[in-house]
């Protein structure tokens, strides 16, 4: 049994991670400021004796005693991270500094939830960890992209300078139950629009691609990364390499929800990457992992979750 800190633990990915760690018998300290996370996401965990919650903003120092840290606290969807861009950069950078300082003091192993966004609008496809990326430093996505890039820098400098045991995972688009209904991400948007019988908003011509990983697969890879030998730092790509266009996704959502909603085409947001697909050779080799949930299967579970959200549908 270990004492494990999960920052951003009341969010989409964080709540699934807390759940899995508790199921493994660990003591879980969930830290969140509820910017995008909710009490509802962790309500089912609060009765478990191993679970503890602190409402706290990671841009401020935190003094606790733990063995491991998963640093997930950061608004993650464009709508949320562009709402207060300065705060987004602070969450990434000040948050990383504080959690690394904490890890250094208690000699905890620390994992950073980085993102495929650090590759920007990539010139190489699929993206390997060795690719440095093509990121606009002054655009509307930069608060998130550059914040996450600098957080990676900090992790590697604490590793080089203080010999901290770090792990950096680069997460690609992930979906599943407990996604935020208003975060504007494509999977939640399309499902909610289809269930409500509203128009399905396709941005651009819908030929841009993404590869979607189901949350259970993602969490499995994150947990496995933490158990790798100390000399393994990452960065390591985690995601599902099967690529779909947004038009294909829309058609699949319409089929699974049996919805009559019509597609409507809207302007493409600025800096929207044309395509994105992880090269997961490293994850296969080091973690012995690859995703097992088909998009259709994962969408069905996510659709069921949103159907039960009577506050949303
Ligand atoms: P989310 O918005 O559901 O979760 C983020 C959580 O962090 C929320 O609970 C939020 O309240 C909390 N938070 C934000 N700022 C905070 C602060 N200053 N102090 C304390 N808590 C704070 O998003 P998610 O999809 O669960 O993402 C979790 C992590 O994974 C993020 O770091 C994100 O960048 C990364 N990630 C997610 C995806 C994805 O597809 N979901 C892809 C790449 C990377
Ligand atoms: N910090 C923290 N919790 C701790 C230890 C440190 O939040 O248990 C914060 C501390 O406020 C500091 C940051 O982490 O600003 C970086 O700590 P570090 O020791 O690396 O740097 P220094 O204190 O020398 O600036
Ligand atoms: N998208 C869309 N309709 C929506 C929301 C998003 O067509 O209602 C598109 C968006 O332009 C992007 C893709 O879907 O090309 C994925 O968007 P999301 O915000 O989910 O993830 P990200 O852009 O961060 O990969």
Image: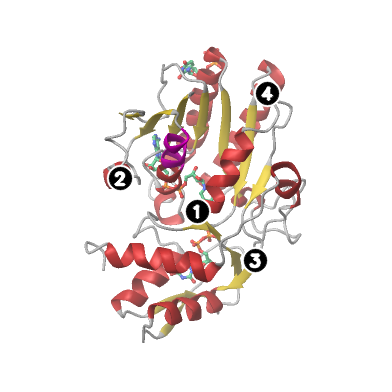
Magenta span dominant secondary structure: helix
Residue at image position (32%, 42%) is 42
**Mark positioned earlier in the residue sequence (3 or 2):** 2
Span colored in magenta: 17-24
Numbered disc 3: secondary structure:
loop
Decide which of 130, 139 is in the foreground and name it. 130
Residue at disc 2, CB closer than 8 Å to ligand 1: yes
Residue 135 seen: yes
* Depicted 200 relative to depicted 217: above or below: below
Most extreme residue toward the left is 311
Q: How far separated are the C-alphas under marks 4 and 1?
A: 28 Å
* Foreground: disc 4 or disc 2: 2
Residue at figure coordinates x 53%, y 13% from the top left = 105
Indicate the position of residue 286 as horizontal and vertical percent values. Answer: 73, 42
As for residue 230 lying within the magenta part, the answer is no
- Residue 242, disc: 3
Using the image, determine if residue 98 lies above or below residue 270.
above
Marking on residue 159: 4
Alpha carbon of mark 2 to alpha carbon of mark 1: how far? Answer: 17 Å
Near mark 3 (Cα within 10 A), the count class, few <14, some 14-19 or many ≥20, is some
Q: Say the numbered circle drawn on residue 38.
A: 2
Q: Residue at x 27, y 47 (%)?
A: 40
Name the residue that disc number 1 marks. Answer: 215
């Amino acid at each position: 049994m270990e004492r494990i800190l999960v920052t951003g633990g009341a969010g989409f990915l964080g709540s699934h991670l807390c759940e899995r760690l508790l199921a493994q018998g660990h003591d879980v300290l969930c830290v969140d400021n509820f910017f995008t996370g909710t009490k509802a996401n962790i309500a089912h965990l609060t009765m478990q004796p191993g679970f503890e919650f602190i409402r706290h903003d990671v841009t401020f120092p935190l003094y606790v005693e733990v063995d491991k840290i998963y640093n997930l606290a950061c608004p993650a969807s464009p709508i949320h991270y562009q709402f207060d861009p300065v705060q987004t950069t602070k969450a990434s950078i000040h948050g990383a500094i504080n959690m690394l300082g904490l890890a250094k003091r208690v000699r905890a192993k620390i994992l950073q939830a980085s993102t495929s966004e650090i590759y920007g609008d990539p010139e190489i496809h699929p993206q390997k960890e060795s690719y440095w990326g093509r990121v606009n430093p002054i655009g509307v996505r930069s608060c998130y992209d550059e914040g996450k890039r600098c957080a990676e820098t900090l992790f590697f400098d604490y590793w080089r300078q203080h010999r901290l045991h770090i792990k950096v995972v680069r997460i690609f688009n992930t979906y599943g139950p407990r996604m935020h209904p208003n975060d504007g991400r494509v999977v939640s948007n399309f499902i909610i629009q289809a269930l409500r019988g509203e128009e399905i908003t396709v941005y651009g011509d819908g030929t841009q691609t993404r590869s979607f990983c189901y949350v259970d697969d993602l969490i499995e890879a994150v947990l496995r990364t933490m158990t790798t030998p100390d000399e393994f730092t990452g960065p390591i790509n985690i995601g599902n390499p099967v690529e779909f266009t947004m038009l294909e996704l829309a058609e699949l959502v319409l089929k699974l929800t049996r919805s009559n909603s019509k597609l409507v085409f809207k302007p493409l947001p600025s800096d929207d990457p044309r395509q994105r697909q992880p090269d997961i050779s490293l994850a296969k080799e080091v973690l012995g992992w690859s995703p097992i949930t088909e998009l259709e299967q994962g969408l069905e579970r996510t659709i069921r979750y949103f159907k039960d959200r009577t506050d949303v549908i």
